[in-house]
Image: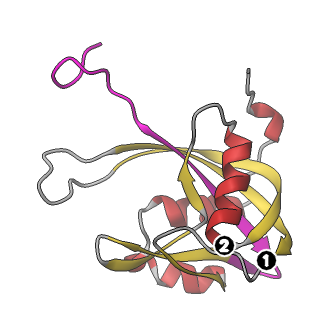
Amino acid sequence: MAYRQGRFWQPDVTVATVVLDAGRVLCVEERVDGRLVLNQPAGHLEPDESLVEAALRETVEETGWTVALTGFVGAYQWKSPPRAGETDGRHFLRFAFVATPVSHDPDRRLDDGIAQALWMTPEALRQAQARHRSPLVWQAVADCLSGQRHSLSLLQHIA
């Protein structure tokens, strides 16, 4: 099916990791369009990378934390509102994982745009929804905290 001037439509494929430890959730504070927003460690899938590899890479790049993935929370589809000068929003397909922390490198330089990594209680994160980068932030955390977890074997990477 053709989409916009002969192009095929393709969503942005992203991963996100809900890292849980001692009743807290690992978050990132990042600068987007001039404002500081909250997100979980998240980012785009790169060519030739599995979803699992992307989740592990993005988590360490954005937080300095090496983690162990313990499950797959779910897949989320979302269309963002249009930005200034755009006629249509972007479409995202996000794959969310749950993980536990393994080790931290406090000297690691974090990705551009990341102001800091911080641990928040779920309640503090929920109360800060006006600062979330998207509604996907709280949805993945809420689903994870409610016990929604699936085996990582659901995700197959065929190289």
Residue 105, disc: 1
The question of residue 85 being in magenta is answered with: no
Q: Report crowding for label 1: few under 14, some 14 to 19, many 20 or more residues within 10 A (C-alpha).
A: few
Which numbered mark, 2 or 1, is in the foreground of this view? Answer: 1
* Residue 153 relative to residue 113: left or right: right
Q: Which mark is drawn over residue 77?
A: none
Vertical arrangement, residue 36 with respect to residue 59, above or below = below
Q: Is residue 17 magenta?
A: yes
Q: CA distance from mark 2 to mark 1?
A: 9 Å
The reply to whether the C-beta atoms of the residues labelled 2 and 1 are less than 8 Å apart is no
**Left or right side of 49 for 106:** right
**Magenta span of residues:** 1-25
x, y percent for residue 44: 52, 48
Q: Quadrant of the C terminus?
A: top right
Q: Quadrant of residue 98?
A: bottom right
Tell me: residue 141, above or below residue 1. below
Q: Amino acid at mark 2?
A: Thr
Task: Using the image, tell me which numbered label, if any, was put on residue 63.
Answer: 2
Disc 2 crowd rating (10 Å Cα; few below 14, some 14-19, many 20+) is many
Q: Residue at x 69, y 36 (%)?
A: 50
Q: Is residue 6 left or right of residue 29?
A: left
Q: Indicate the secondary structure of the residue bearing disc 2.
A: helix
| In the depicted structure, whether residue 76 falls above or below residue 68 | above
The structure residue drawn at horizontal position 20% and vertical position 17%, both measured from the top left corner, is 6
Residue in the picture at 57% in, 58% down:
42
Q: Amino acid at mark 1?
A: Asp
Picture quarter with the N terminus: top left
In x, y percent, where is residue 11? 40, 36
Which of the marked residues, 2 or 1, is nearer the chain's N terminus?
Answer: 2
Q: Residue 137's x, y, as percent? A: 52, 64
Image point (19%, 44%), residue name: 88
Tell how many labels. 2
